[in-house]
Image (spheres, helix red, strand yellow):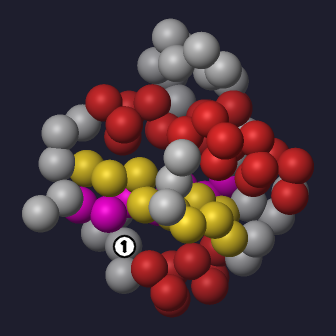
Amino acid sequence: MKLKVGIIGCGKIGGLNSYNHKDKLNHAAVYKSLHGVELFAVADTNKYNLSRFSQLWKPKKQYLDYKKMIKDCNLDI
């Protein structure tokens, strides 16, 4: 069973500073590199950043409201 991770904020630290997956200095890259961890959901109030992040990192769910993400997803991290 994998731990389900949610990220709040898709900006540079969240994962939009790495379009080629070589930059490992962001949350998405670190979580994707860990065995037993699934990047399950992401939330950002900026629709454009949310869309770009989702295309790059492929989380299962995307939210514009982080409170709804937390309520809906039963996240571990």
Residue at 87% across, 49% down: 48
Residue at 32% across, 53% down: 38
Q: Is residue 23 left or right of residue 43?
A: left
Q: Is residue 12 left or right of residue 71?
A: right
The answer to if 4 sits in the magenta stretch is: yes
Q: Label 1: state its secondary structure.
A: loop
Rendering coords of residue 13 (x, y %): 61, 35
Q: Is residue 11 above or below residue 18?
A: below
Q: Which residue is situated farthest in the bottom direction here?
A: 71
Rendering coords of residue 74 (x, y %): 36, 81
Q: Which residue is situated farthest in the top direction here?
A: 22
Under mark 1, the amino acid is Leu
The answer to if 1 sits in the magenta stretch is: no
Quick one: quadrant of the C terminus?
bottom left
Residue at 32% across, 63% down: 4
Question: What residue range appears in magenta?
Answer: 3-9
Residue under pointer 1:
75
Q: Which residue is situated farthest in the left direction here?
A: 1
Residue at 44% across, 80% down: 73
Quick one: quadrant of the N terminus?
bottom left
Q: Is residue 37 left or right of residue 22?
A: left
Q: Is residue 24 above or below residue 72?
A: above
By secondary structure, the bulk of the magenta-drawn segment is best described as: strand
Rendering coords of residue 20 (x, y %): 59, 15
User: How many residues crowd mark 1 within 10 Å: few (<14), some (14–19), many (20+)?
Assistant: some
